[in-house]
Image: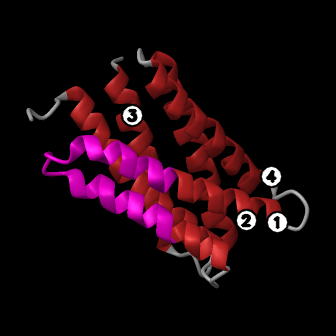
Amino acid sequence: MKNWLWWLLAGIVAFAGGVLGLINPNAAQITSTTITGWALVVMSLLQGRAAWKSAALRERAGAGLFAVAGLFLGLSLLMGPFGDGTLLRWMLCGLLLVVGLAKLWIGRHFKTDPLFWVVAVAGGLSIVLGLIVLLGVGLQLGVILSLELLGSGAALVVMALRLEKPVAH
């Protein structure tokens, strides 16, 4: 299986997890958090596989770091936060901010691509969600995580498609 296919699978899992998490977050906060947790775990494992198969050290390190952070966050959602949840809140805030900045950084390589806006919006969404978590705005955790999965899924799909068929500059 080619490396771009692992990115595509990770994007599809993330996007599907985001959709499932948003279907009914009011009636099923626990369910949406569980779905998001499992989607993060599966996405992280697939992204870790893609990182392992990457030839470039920089790509391998970045994808591996995000895979480990996503795996830890997903497992924290599934098993429950440590202590009173403050660590999970700070970790989620930091992860969202770093992931958002990373998407914008990666997205700069797609400036000439017609789908550049997908990666840029996904990065901006992650940053906004990180700030929402930091400020303690009363959005449900399931909604925040589901929106992040939607954005990450869309960005991963675009990046996978560009790895498979690069756009001429």
| Quadrant of the drawing holding the C terminus | top left
**Residue beneath label 2, please?**
89
Q: Which residues are magenta?
A: 99-128
Q: Nearer the viewer, residue 164 or 134?
A: 134
| Mark identifier at residue 32 | none
- Which residue: 15% across, 46% down? 113
Q: Nearer the viewer, residue 162 or 74?
A: 162
| Mark identifier at residue 7 | 3
The Cα atoms of the two marked residues, 1 and 3, are separated by: 31 Å
Q: Is residue 19 left or right of residue 140?
A: left
Nearest-to-viewer mark from 3 and 2: 2
In the picture shown, does residue 119 fall above or below 132?
Answer: above
- The extreme bottom residue here reads 138
Q: Residues within 10 Å of mark 4 (few under 14, many from 20)?
A: few
User: Do callouts 1 and 2 mark residues in contact (Cβ within 8 Å)?
Assistant: yes
**Which is more N-terminal, label 1 or label 4?**
4
**Residue beneath label 4, please?**
79
